[in-house]
Amino acid sequence: MSKKVLILSGSPRKGGNSDLLCDEFMRGAQESGNDVEKIFVRDKKIGYCTACYYCRDTGNGCAIKDDMAEILDKMLAADVIVMASPVYFYSIDAQMKTVIDRTVAKWRDIKNKEFYYIMSAAENSNTAMDCTLECFRGLAVCLDGSVEKGIIYGTGVYEAGTIKNTPAFKEAYEMGLNV
């Protein structure tokens, strides 16, 4: 059965290591017959949540009129959500954090999603990504029916493109195939 897959690439650089892992995941998911869309978050205009609670008080979505409304609609429509970020000081980067915070406008409606997480880091240890992974999981735990399906650890990479020479590159493709 074909699934609708949404990939949120939080990489601040196109062709960066976490972005390349997204591309490989996407290639695999498409080859196995899924409908896949990748959003390069940096290219979107997404303002910070201001905790005005317009979304809660009116039920009319977010008061900030930017590209996040489109992303939220795509998150609602997706069966699978892939979230990717390079590790910044043992956490997610600002682009991904902004997306996560802005889901407050629809978080109660985003239900029954399969989640995959992609991370890349200069360090060689998966434990360097523990906090990053917990940031992703922090969103999913708040969403009814969310299920974690896979994690890709791209370790020991710093310069853009070096991920291509690691087992994580093949793993991303294979994980996408098995969505």
Image (spheres, rainbow, N blue to C red):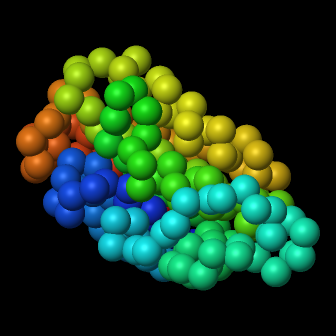
Using the image, determine if residue 125 lies above or below residue 11. Answer: above
* The N terminus lies in quadrant: bottom right
| Residue 118 position by quadrant | top left
- In the orientation shown, which residue stands out farthest toward the right? 57
Using the image, determine if residue 69 lies above or below residue 24. Answer: below
In percent of width and height, residue 148 lies at 62, 43
Closest to the observer, 63 or 141 = 63
In percent of width and height, residue 43 lies at 33, 73
| Residue 11 position by quadrant | bottom left
Closest to the observer, 81 or 134 = 134
In percent of width and height, residue 81 lies at 55, 60
Residue for point 52% across, 66% down: 47
Residue for point 47% across, 45% down: 117
Using the image, determine if residue 106 lies above or below residue 131. Answer: below
Residue for point 56% across, 42% down: 136
Q: Relative to residue 60, is residue 29 drawn left or right?
A: left
The answer to whether residue 155 is seen in the rendering is: yes
| Residue 88 position by quadrant | top left
Tally of marks:
0
The answer to whether residue 26 is seen in the rendering is: no
Q: Relative to residue 161, is residue 81 drawn left or right?
A: right
In percent of width and height, residue 98 lies at 52, 55
Q: Relative to residue 128, is residue 158 drawn left or right?
A: left
Closest to the observer, 140 or 70 = 70
